[in-house]
Image (cartoon, rainbow, N blue to C red):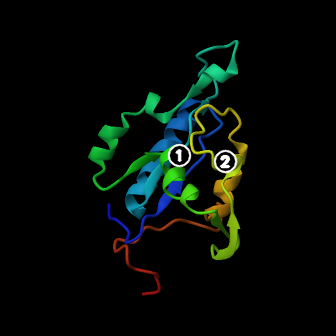
Amino acid sequence: TYKTATPKYVTFEADQGGWNNIRMAMETILVFAAVTGRTLVLPPPKGMYLLNKDKDNKENNKLAFSDFFHLEDIAAELKGVDIITMEEFLKREANKHPGLNEISDSTGEDTGRAVPPPNDGLADWSNTYDLKPLNEFLRKVGYVKKMETTKDFFVIPQDPERSSFED
């Protein structure tokens, strides 16, 4: 792993599938954070398919990744990988500005248009069942690469400062 000069983050939405999909997505995003030097931002607790603590009240069915993964041990094993909560990320980045700038889906460039944090700058989403406004905000202010499985692939250079693969 390596660190970038300025903090960079990777956020993700928990898979909507069953436990194995959720687990594999977490493993993948951990590797991505490690090889790109980004801080992993965990999504807020939410209901997870077929993992019900209370069948009568969906508000009581929210689970966090820390309920399943020993995140401190993982961070210690993957030296250099920081893992933070969504609340910590929003307090650190989104709520210290009037809004983060929107990123163009097509180019990944900053548009210069500020996007205010949702729900009046709410940082703690753990008591909120509907995460849609948060996810939409993160998609607007982060670069979301649209990948086509038959055309695109992800390459990780051995040298993190390398910017092309022409040679």
Q: Determine the CA span between mark 2 and mark 1.
A: 10 Å
In the figure, is residue 27 to the left or right of 111?
left
Task: Tell me if label 2 and label 1 are in contact, CB under 8 Å.
Answer: yes
Which amino acid type is shown beneath numbered disc 1? Met
Give the answer, above or below, for where 25 lies relative to 35: above
| Residue 164, numbered circle | none
In the figure, is residue 116 to the left or right of 20?
right
The residue sitting at 48% across, 35% down in the picture is 65
**Image quarter in which the N terminus is found:** bottom left
Structural crowding at the residue carrying mark 2, measured as other residues with C-alpha within 10 Å and reported as few (<14), some (14–19) or many (≥20): some
The residue sitting at 57% across, 37% down in the picture is 21
Residue 120 x %, y %: 69, 49
**Image quarter in which the C terminus is found:** bottom left
The residue sitting at 56% across, 66% down in the picture is 153
Residue position for label 2 = 134
Residue 56 appears anywhere in the view: yes
| Residue 86, numbered circle | 1
Which amino acid type is shown beneath numbered disc 2? Leu
Give the answer, above or below, for where 63 lies relative to 11: above
Structural crowding at the residue carrying mark 1, measured as other residues with C-alpha within 10 Å and reported as few (<14), some (14–19) or many (≥20): many
Residue 135 x %, y %: 67, 49
Residue 24 x %, y %: 50, 41
Q: Which numbered disc, 2 or 1, marks the residue that appears first in the sequence?
A: 1
Please tell me whether mark 1 sits on a helix, a strand or a loop.
helix
